[in-house]
Amino acid sequence: MPLEAIDDASILDGIVGTVEGISDVGDGWFEVRIGLAIATMLRADGSGDAGQLLNMLFGNASLLADVLLVDVELPDGFLGRFGGVRHGVAGLRARVGAGDRALTCAALKPQGLAPEALASLAHRLALGGVDYIKDDHGLADQAYSPFAARVGACAAAVREAGARTGHRTRYVPSLSGDLDQLRAQIACARDAGLDTVMVAPMLAGLSNVQALVSGNPDIAFFAHPTLGGAARIAPELLIGKVFPLVGADAVVFPTFGGRFGYSPATCRDLAGNARRLGAMPVPAGGMTLARVPEKLDFYGPETMLLIGGALLLAREDLTRETAAFTEAVARHAYR
């Protein structure tokens, strides 16, 4: 917008963004600090709209190939306008009776399995004492595994295993589809006795996730990072700050040294940002049992370690391998 075309002084003084600083960070890159008006990110009723927040922070600028969104500093009192974390670290621990230890998580995969086969995996994982068992994010409402059938079967399998072990393992179905479908799936999960679900904010839309969290205060939400790398937004900001801003109680992200390229510094900052907003960091992606001590020393006890395929490799020994995972977490002495 050409400034010369604006003839309202109040807009020039109170709405137009300001360049607050430019610094050379080397190799042809510059850090540019831009001040934006809070009024541009709020709804008429004064509440925050997360989609509009991201629109103002990086909307058209994201179309420039040499621009990255690195961070955002929000004023005190601003976070509450977006809802934020409702259950978080303390709530997720309480759901499974974990005390102050780190939590454990496993994943149901691959795609193509029928609900009964996924339920069998969930049952064996739960017998091993894992805290949370989430759907792989690729599981949706496909013909080979309809959402309602999968949720009913997996919830019953985990509940039966819990009756045998005494551990309150939670099954976490992955939501997908439009807003009406997402709401219907949450209702289906609640009817099956579940209190935790997973959503992908970059697929569902940040404003829609806000609405889901606001409308379901009894439900805890995991946020999956799929498509999070397509927008040139620093993961420390997108996953560590924005996802908790809209209500994610736990944020899944790829840890260093696995299948993805995040550095230890990125992972540390991302986890720290999430915790400061009350959310549980969930490092994943190429995790193995052998790396549990290393990861717990790095992330500390306010962490949920997620091992997926490495557990499933155990095949008929899945329950035993899962038990070894949960025991390694429970007995770890942090450095």
Image: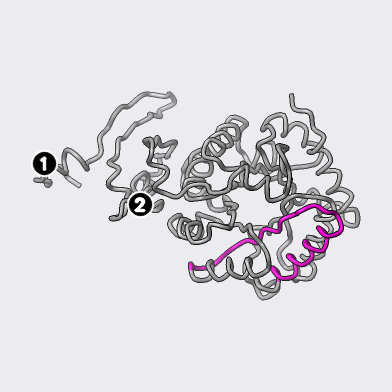
In the image, is residue 258 above or below residue 157?
above
Q: Residues within 10 Å of mark 2 (few under 14, many from 20)?
A: some
- Residue 80 point in image, percent of width and height: 42, 45
Horizontal and vertical percent for residue 108?
73, 58
Closer-to-camera residue (55/83): 83
Q: Is residue 136 left or right of residue 202?
A: right
As shown in the figure, which amino acid type bears the numbered disc 1? Ala
Tell me which numbered mark, 2 or 1, is placed earlier along the sequence: 1
Q: Amino acid at mark 2?
A: Ser
Q: Residues within 10 Å of mark 1 (few under 14, many from 20)?
A: few
Asked if residue 130 lies in the magenta stretch, the reply is no
Residues drawn in magenta: 150-179
Quadrant in which residue 196 is drawn: bottom right
At 59% from the left and 36% from the top, the residue drawn is: 271
Which residue extends farthest bottom? Answer: 143
Residue 9 numbered mark, or none: 1
- Secondary structure type for disc 1: helix
For disc 2, the marked residue is 47
**Colour logic:** one colour
